[in-house]
Image (cartoon, coloured by chain):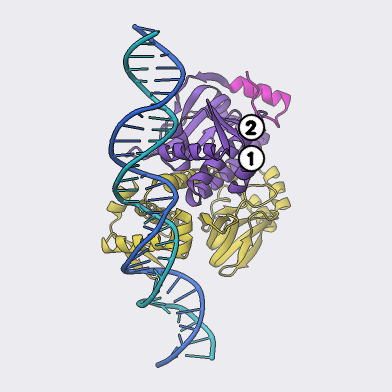
Chain colours: A yellow, B purple, C blue, D cyan
Amino acid sequence: MVRLVSVCASLTGDELALLEQLATPTHFGSGETLFTQGAEAHCVYNVTGGVVRLYKLLSDGRRQVVGFALPGDFLGLAMRDAYGFSADAIGDVAVCAFSRAAYTALVDAKPHLLKRLHEFATHELTLAHEQMMLLGRRTAEEKLICFLLGMQQRWARLGKPSVTVQLPMTRQDIADFLGLTIETVSRTFTRLAKDKTILIVPGGVRVMNAERMHAIAA
Amino acid sequence: MVRLVSVCASLTGDELALLEQLATPTHFGSGETLFTQGAEAHCVYNVTGGVVRLYKLLSDGRRQVVGFALPGDFLGLAMRDAYGFSADAIGDVAVCAFSRAAYTALVDAKPHLLKRLHEFATHELTLAHEQMMLLGRRTAEEKLICFLLGMQQRWARLGKPSVTVQLPMTRQDIADFLGLTIETVSRTFTRLAKDKTILIVPGGVRVMNAERMHAIAA
DNA sequence: CCGCGGAATTGATCTAGATCAATGCGGCGA
DNA sequence: TCGCCGCATTGATCTAGATCAATTCCGCGG
C-alpha cells in the first residue's frame, strides 16, 4: 500500500498495521465518481495518488468546486449520514477507502488518530476561510494568482516543489473553483502570459515572476 | 455560569464541573475585540450570549466576514499558533474563555470532548462549503435570502424560532459576509420588501413569504 | 495522414452589481 | 428640545466580468 501521508504520520507501528487492515486500496479512472452529494456516506477516503475534484451543484446546474484533494487529503470527514459534496477523479486516482463502521470504531479506539483528524479538519476550515475571502473580495486576476500560488505550495508540501505548477483539472474546473467563467479564466491566463508573469505550458503553468505574483496575492 | 450550549451537551456531570473550573466567564461590550487575525492564540472561546463578527482583512482594507458566532459557537478551534481571523462583539457578548494550555490538557484527557469538538469543526466546514457556493455562484437576491433563512434556522436551533429574524449586525457586515456592497444589500432588501417577501423592522426582518424564499434558496 | 470532438482561446456585446454622490433618519448627548 | 453623527437609503453612472458567438488547437482513432 502506498504510504498514507499526513493523517497517519503520528501513529505507532501497530496502529498503522491496524489501519492498513481496515483500509481497502481502490482505484478510480479519469472522470469516475467517488461519491455524490446527498448520497449515504458509506466510506471515508484517504487519497494516495492523483487529484480529486470536490464540488456542489445547484438544482439549475450551477456548480461550485469547493476544493481539489491531493495525495494525503482525507474525504468524507464530516461523519454525517450524507456526503455534503460530490467527488470525482481528475485523471487516475488511488485511494484507501474505510467503511464508516471501521472508521468510527477506529476513531473511538484511537484518540491519537482523532486528534490528527481534528487537526486536519481544522486546517481544511482555515483553507475554506481563505477561499471565502478569495471568492468574496478578490478580482479575477488575484483569484487566478492566489490559486496558482496555492497549488504550487500544496505540491511543494507534498515534496514536489517546482516553478511549474501542474494543473490536471480543466479550465472549467478552475472557473467553478474561483467563481468565474471559463472565458474569464482563459483571458486572465493569456493576459498574465503576455505580462511574462507566467508561461503557459501543456498541463500546467510555469511561474515566471514569483515576486509580482506574491505581491498581488498580498 | 450560563450553561454551555452545544459543545458540552455530551459531557458527564464531573466533566462539566471540570470544564467550569477551567472556564473564565468574560464580557465584551459592543465593538470590543475578542482577538485579532495573526495574533498569538492564547485563548479558545465559547460564546454564551450575544453575537460575534468573524472576519479577515486584506492589506488594502477589503474585508470578508467569514461568519457570525451565536451562543454555543466555539472560536479559536484551529489549535494553531495564531488566530486565522479577527473577532469582535456585535452588541454585548458573554463568553467562556479557556487558556490554550487548559484547552489542550482538557482535550488530551477527554476523548469525549474532542469528539464533540471535531463534530463541531466538521459542521463549521460544511457551513463554509455552503458559503463558498453562495459567494461563488449565487446572485445578490439569492445571497440575501439564503442569509436570512440561515440566520432564522440558526436562531431556531438555539430555541428562538420566529418569523422575525434578528439582525444585530450592520448592513456593511452583511455586505462583507455576502461579498456585496452596502448599497446592493440595501437595494435588495428594499426590493424584497416591495415584493412583500419580507418586512423590514427595527433590528431585523420579518419573513412574509417563506415559501417563495425557500424556492429561491432551492 | 485525415478528420472528428472536446477543450481552449479570442472577439463583440451586455448587464449585475460596483462606484460615486446626495439625502434621509434615528438615537443620544448637551 | 435641538443638532449632530453614524448608519441607511436612494439615484445616476460606470465597469469587471458575464454572455453570446466564432474560430483554433490538440489528442486520438481509423
- Whether residue A63 sits left or right of residue B161 in the image: it is left
First to last magenta residue range: B1-23
In the image, what residue type sits under mark 2? Val
Q: For this rendering, which residue is in front, B164 or B193? A: B193
Q: Is residue B81 above or below residue A210?
A: above
Label annotation for residue A134: none
Residue D1's spot in the image, x, y percent?
A: 39, 8
**Mark 2 and 1 residues: CB-CB less than 8 Å, in contact?**
yes
Q: Chain of mark 2?
A: B
Q: Within the magenta stretch, is there residue A209?
A: no
Q: Within the magenta stretch, is there residue B10?
A: yes
Q: For this rendering, which residue is in front, B40 or A12? A: B40
In the image, what residue type sits under mark 1? Ala
Write the residue at 47% across / 45% down.
Answer: A132
Q: Examine the rendering and report whether any part of residue A126 can be seen.
A: yes
User: Crowding at label 1, few (<14), some or many (≥20) Cα neighbours within 10 Å?
Assistant: some
Label annotation for residue B210: 1
Of helix, strand and loop, which one carries label 2? loop
Q: Chain of mark 1?
A: B
Residue B209's spot in the image, x, y percent?
A: 62, 39
What is the quadrant of residue C12 in the picture? bottom left
What is the quadrant of residue C1 in the picture? bottom left
Q: Is residue B177 above or below residue A17?
A: above
Q: Examine the rendering and report whether any part of residue A11 can be seen.
A: no
Residue B100's spot in the image, x, y percent?
A: 52, 29
Q: Which residue in the structure is indicated by mark 2? A: B163
Q: For this rendering, which residue is in front, A79 or A84? A: A84
Q: Quadrant of the N terminus of chain B?
A: top right
State which tag comes first along the sequence, 2 or 1: 2
What is the quadrant of residue B6 in the picture? top right
Q: CA distance from mark 2 to mark 1?
A: 9 Å
